[in-house]
Amino acid sequence: MSRNRDVIIDHSGRRRLTRSQKIGIGSVATLVSVAAVGLIAGFLLDRLLDFDDAFDAGGEWDEGGGVNTRWYDPS
C-alpha cells in the first residue's frame, strides 16, 4: 500500500497540506496565541496592580492598638 496517496500536489507542483495537517497547525497556533495573551495579561496586571495594596484593607491589624482604615476613622 502506498503512503503517497495522502500527498496532494497542486497544478504548479507544490505539495499541499492535508486537512489534518492544517488542523494540527491551527491547533498549535491557537495554543501559542492563547499562551502569549495570558503572559501579556499577567505581565500587565503585575505592572499595573500593586498586590500589597490590593489585598490590604488600608489599616493596621496586628499592631498599633486601634482600628484605622480608609473607610473608618474614629478620630
Image (cartoon, helix red, strand yellow):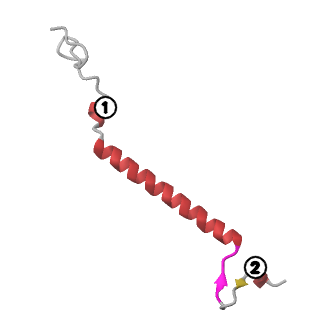
For the residue carrying disc 1, how many other residues have a C-alpha within 10 Å: few (<14), some (14-19), or many (20+)? few
- The question of residue 27 being in magenta is answered with no
Q: Between residue 20 and residue 13, name the one nearer to us.
A: 13
Q: Amino acid at mark 1?
A: Ala
- The question of residue 15 being in magenta is answered with yes
Residue 71 percent coordinates (x, y)? 25, 17
Q: State which quadrant residue 63 falls in.
A: top left
Q: CA distance from mark 1 to mark 2?
A: 57 Å
Extreme left residue here? 75
Magenta stretch, overall SS: loop
What residue sits 76% from the left and 84% below the top?
Answer: 4
Q: Which residue is mark 1?
A: 54
Q: Amino acid at mark 2?
A: Asp
Does 62 appear above or below 53? above
For the residue carrying disc 2, how many other residues have a C-alpha within 10 Å: few (<14), some (14-19), or many (20+)? few
Does 32 appear above or below 46? below
* Chain part drawn in magenta: 14-18
Q: Earlier in the sequence, mark 1 or mark 2?
A: 2
Identify the secondary structure beneath mark 1: helix
Q: Quadrant of the N terminus?
A: bottom right
56 left or right of 35 in image:
left
What residue sits 39% from the left and 53% below the top?
Answer: 40
What residue sits 72% from the left and 82% below the top?
Answer: 7
23 left or right of 59 in image:
right
Residue 12 percent coordinates (x, y)? 65, 91
Q: Which residue is mark 2?
A: 6
Residue 56 percent coordinates (x, y)? 28, 26
Residue 68 percent coordinates (x, y)? 21, 15
